[in-house]
């Protein structure tokens, strides 16, 4: 049996189990999506949002990319953000990185990962540059990478706050709250490292005055 065929068999078993436990399970999911949370996480397969938070399908709206980035020229993440904020009316946005992130470690190197990956990782290198003094003082590479994971999450939360999408919702509806978390692969525990309440002031140059 091919590996992908096993996935299809497991899917059928899972669906059968859900219906056996709750006959109306899929009917509810098909007609209702009212999540309170937008999750911007890493594409790493070891960090599934629903499983590590103990939530059910329909409770978290999820976007994932390499190293959980909020890049201001990425129409993918921005379209997810706009839909979540303006249509789903989420109350919280969580940027969740994870310790031991391969994207973070790759950005710390000087290796050429070819054009597209280089472009993406450059955004993480910019975070390193902003915090170079603190990071360079950490001698152990893994400890330095873990600290960069935390600082990167912080900067991505800040990048959310810089968008007109978030600022408009802050001004008119006093939501969403922004959260920066880092998940531990070794212990399964989420470490909250940064928070921004709705309406938090940021650097004036990023604040829109005509929303």
Image (cartoon, helix red, strand yellow):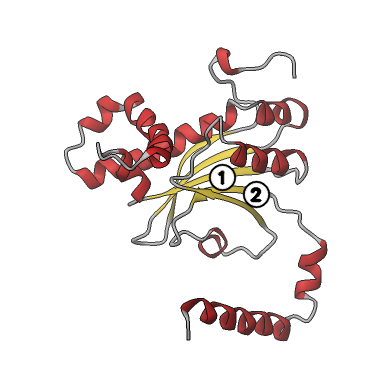
- Which is more toward the observer, 106 or 61? 106
Res 92 quadrant in image = top right
Q: Which residue is mark 2?
A: 37
Packing grade of label 1 (10 A; few <14, some 14-19, many >=20) is: many
Q: Residue furthest left?
A: 139
- Which is more toward the observer, 57 or 125? 125
Tag 1, which secondary structure? strand
At which x and y percent is residue 72?
55, 30
At which x and y percent is residue 99?
35, 50
Tag 2, which secondary structure? strand
At which x and y percent is residue 68?
48, 44
Looking at the image, do the residues carrying marks 1 and 2 touch, with CB atoms under 8 Å apart?
Answer: yes
- Which is more toward the observer, 54 or 136? 136
Between the C-alphas of marks 1 and 2, the distance is: 7 Å
Res 176 quadrant in image = top right
Q: Which residue is mark 1?
A: 94
Q: Is residue 193 left or right of residue 8?
A: left
Residue at the (62%, 80%) spot, across then down: 14
Residue at the (61%, 78%) spot, across then down: 11
């Amino acid at each position: 049996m091919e590996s992908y065929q096993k996935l299809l068999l497991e899917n059928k078993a899972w669906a059968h189990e859900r219906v056996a436990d709750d006959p109306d399970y899929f009917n509810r999911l098909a007609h209702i999506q009212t999540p309170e949370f937008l999750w911007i996480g890493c594409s790493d397969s070891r960090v599934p949002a629903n499983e590590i938070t103990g939530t059910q399908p329909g409770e978290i709206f999820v976007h994932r990319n390499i190293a959980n980035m909020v890049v201001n020229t990425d129409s993918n993440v921005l379209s997810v953000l706009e839909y979540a904020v303006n249509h789903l009316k989420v109350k919280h946005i969580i940027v969740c990185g994870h310790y031991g992130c391969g994207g973070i470690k790759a950005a710390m190197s000087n290796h050429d990962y070819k054009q597209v990956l280089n472009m993406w990782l450059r955004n993480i290198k910019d975070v390193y540059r902003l915090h170079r003094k603190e990071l360079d003082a950490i001698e152990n590479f893994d400890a330095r990478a873990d600290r960069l994971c935390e600082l990167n999450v912080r900067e991505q939360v800040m990048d959310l706050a810089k968008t007109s999408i978030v600022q408009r919702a802050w001004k008119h509806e006093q939501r969403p709250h922004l959260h920066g978390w880092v998940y531990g692969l070794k212990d399964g525990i989420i470490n909250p490292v940064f928070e921004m309440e709705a309406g938090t002031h940021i650097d004036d140059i990023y604040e829109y005055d005509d929303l």
